[in-house]
Structure formats: C-alpha cells, structure tokens
Image: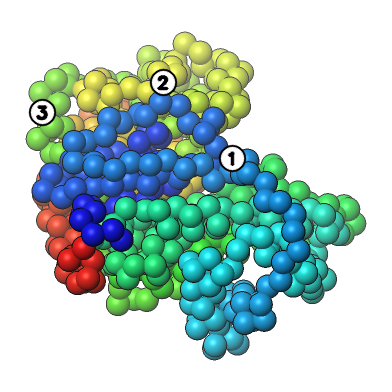
Amino acid sequence: MKTGTPVIDILLLLEGTFPYVSGGVSSWVNQIIRGFPEFSFGIIFMGSRREDYGEMKYALPDNVVHFEAHYLYEPQSEIPVRECKMPPEILDAVKQAHAYYQHESTCPAGDGAYRKMLEHLTKGELSREMLLYSEEAWSQICDQYRSRSTDPSFVDYFWTIRAMHSPIWLLNDIAAKAPPARLYHTVSTGYAGFLGVLLKHRTGTPLLLSEHGIYTKERKIDLYQSEWIKDNRTVFQRESTQISYFRQLWIRFFEMLGQSCYLASNRIVALYEANRLRQIRDGAPAAKTCNIPNGIDLPRFAALRELRPASPPRVLCLIGRVVPIKDVKTYIRAMRTVVNQMPDVEAWIAGPEDEAPEYAEECRNLVSSLGLSAHVKFLGFQKVDALLPKIGLVVLSSISEALPLVLLEGFAAGVPAVSTDVGSCSQLIHGLDEEDRALGSAGSVVGLADPQALAAAALELLGDEAKWHSAQAAGIARVQRYYTHGHMFDAYRNVYRQAMDETPRQQEAS
C-alpha cells in the first residue's frame, strides 16, 4: 500500500444487491451505512452482467468514500494462446486443495494445500493461462472427468469447469487493486465472500461475514430451478432420485466458496439461531459465530399507525420482488379461495418485476386464468411507508427467507402477517423463547406451497377483528422489545470495534 493512502474504515463486499437491486438485503446495507456516520465505507459491487442491472436503486450515503462495480460474467479479453507449464508444486497444491473439499475427512493435509494454493494465486504464480493452456491442467481436467463425471459430454464438462473458475482470476485482480481498509465486511459467501478471502490472505486485515440467508442454500434452490444447466444423459441413464452431474458440480463449487469464507472470517454473523447452527453444520467454526437480528427504524413506522383506519382494511399485500423464490403463484392461488369467501377483498403485489420478467408474466397470466383481475393488483415498486397504512395483512409466501424486514416493518406499523414457515418467520410471528412467546402471535405461519392453508390463515385473521387486533398488539410489542435499530446498531458497533482492533498495526500506520 502506498504511504499516505487514505484507509477506509469498512470495505463492503456486495454481490447482486445494494445499490442496484432493491430488497431486504439492500435495505439493510443502506441502514448499516447510514447508521454509522462515524465510519467511512467503501463498496465493491459484483454482478453477473452489466445489462442485468439498471440505474442505482439507492443513492450512496455521504460516508461512502469509494465505489466500484464489476461484472463477473461479461466477456473477458482473450488471452493469447501460448505454451505454458504448471510447476509441480502448484499442481500438487491445486490437486490436494480440491481433494480436501471433496473428501475433507480423508485429506488432513488439504487445508495447508488450500492455503498454499491461495498464496500461489495471490502472488500471480497460479495464472489463468495455466488453467487454459497448460498440459498439466488439461490432464487434471481429463482425469477428473474420467473419475467423477456421470455426464457423457466431455465438451460440456470442460466448458463448465472454465466458466466456474473464470471469475476467480477477476476476483484476484479486484483484490490486488482494492483500496486499503481497516475491515472487510462481506454480506454473503459466494463470490463476494471469496473476494473477502483473497483480501484477507493478501493483507491480514480482519474479515467479517454477515449472512442474511444461507448463500449456499439459496444458490442450491436457484441451481435446481435453472434451465441453462445441461443434462446430457438419456432417459434410460437418468434416475429420478438423482440430480444432474453439472448441478451437483455447481453446488459443490459454491459450498467450497462458502466454507473458504467461513474459515477465513474473523467473525460470522447470522440473523437468528437456526441459521447460526446451519452455518456450523456447513463448516463455520462455532466459536466465530454469533446472532445479530435485523432492526428497523421504530419511530418511522410507529408513526404510520396514526394513519390507519379503525377497522383492518380487507387488503392483503405481498411486498417483495416478483421472482420464483417468493412463490408469488401460491399467493395468487390462495387469493382464489379468499375472494370466494370475501368478495370485497383485494390482493396487492408490491415489488419490481424486472428481475425475472418471464416469471412475472406467468404470474399475470395466472391471475387472469383464475378470474382474479379485479382483485389482484400488480403495483410495481412502492414505498413501504405509503402501503402499510392501507393494508390489513402482510403476506409472505416465499420458499426461502432469512429474517425479512418487511414483517418487522409491518408489525411496527400495526399490520399482522401470514407467512410460510421459512427462515426466522415463525420466530418473528410466534416468538423465540418463553418470554417472547408470552407476547402472543402476530399472525399465522403455514407450510410451503400450500395455497389452501395460506387462504385459511388470511381469512381467519381478516374475518375476526378481535383476533386481528390481538395479533397487531403482539407484533408491536415484539418489534419494540427485540428488533429496533438501536439493538442492531449497538451489536454491530461492538463487532466493528472489536474487528478493527485486530487490524495489523503496519496497516494502521500506512
């Protein structure tokens, strides 16, 4: 690092989120930056392709002193074909590191080999040319294909391996040019987390990981649903209980990235206990883990209660992106039953549709086919403050969540919720421990992809005003006691201070 270069307090490593994508994680990042005006922040944003993102959805706060954006799957400049060799010690480190992540228990020396591989990578000794053009890498790929692949296409295997590893060298270049910081803070594992690993390895600067959802779990869901992943087996070669080899390969790759980040992080933060335990099962050292739940701006949302009508409006609202993981179709199907019994009810869908336009179109077609066009309204992105006073229930039909801010914001504004049993939603609605549960239930929790159960829960709350008011009171009490900005900021301030105290002394003096 150059003498006199300003040192950023906290360098945020963000993948596919703030400031280009709206949603719970982005909202949280915005809160964190604005909640600590005493710290300077830098941001390294990583996305897939530039064309997948529009303008920034959030204005950068004044204490963001550095911003850069990179796109991992845009075409990279071609490297001229030239003969090159992979030295035996590098090839050995690569082989052992891969074996370690494939069979950790039987490869005790693998952790050291993995660290050695990182050292070769960050020093520029393990180059992209070696993967592309060395005979040693070619032989390794062929050996791996013959011994492991159950897909008959070597060509697809070869290009999958290239596509999988290609971003690694871009991440290494980003790490080499990153501004100096007192702390690296990644908000996921995956590519952002691996960038944190590379930065930590280069500088020794502490790395903090905050996971809202478990990245590897969410990527598994995406990969199971992805249509771009090939399966070249014939119908006679396939077994209904097995997923395709290339899906397994991508899943293992992201599991490896996740475990790498867990091992490199100084502190690992989960939003709630079930996720902390999942992190430990996935390889996080238990002593590094802790829970810090999300918090909301209580005065801001509490003020919205004054704008509410005396009786709960017969309006249900799903607030979130129109994407498959939110399972908007189950919400729509549930509304057919709700409307049958409450003809004056309205169901709103308030969220952007540009992330998965084909899915959004399927949702619109489903509304039309069920004869719900007069009842189900697609509102697009809306400011939540304007929505909450007008609705009677917040509905969350997702197949995966962490600790959704939209439920907490709804509670503070006096709106109960009906949610699927994902993430911390049961904890938020029914309570975590005996003291918390004594506050009562702030709504209902139902199973995944069950429109009848979702409809029944919504009808029960909207059809019984006393029960609705009881749920409203429980939600207000719970968010006031456990989920405010004050609780969250105090916890993160302690984590930040402790981590910065571990910053190498030579960096502080730079």
Q: Is residue 100 positioned above or below 250 on the image?
A: below
Closer to the N terminus: mark 3 or mark 2?
3
- Residue 427 as seen in the image, left or right of residue 93: left
**Camera sees residue 414:** no
Of 144 and 243, nearer the camera is 144
**Camera sees residue 465:** yes
Mark 3 = which residue? 303
Residue 329 spot, x, y in % from top left: 54, 31
The alpha-carbon separation of the residues under discs 3 and 2 comes to 24 Å
The alpha-carbon separation of the residues under discs 1 and 3 comes to 45 Å
Residue 140 spot, x, y in % from top left: 74, 72
Residue type, numbered disc 3:
Ala
Which mark, by number, is residue 74? 1
Of 122 and 229, nearer the camera is 122
- Circle 3 crowding by C-alpha within 10 Å: few under 14, some 14–19, many from 20: some
Residue type, numbered disc 2:
Gly
Residue appearing at x 24%, y 47% in the figure: 41
Mark 2 = which residue? 380
Are the residues at dot 1 and dot 3 in contact (C-beta closer than 8 Å)?
no
Q: Is residue 45 positioned above or below 247 on the image?
A: above
Report helix, strand or loop for mark 1.
loop
Residue projecting furthest to the top: 374
Which mark, by number, is residue 23? none
Residue appearing at x 32%, y 45% in the figure: 43
Closer to the N terminus: mark 1 or mark 3?
1
Report helix, strand or loop for mark 2.
loop
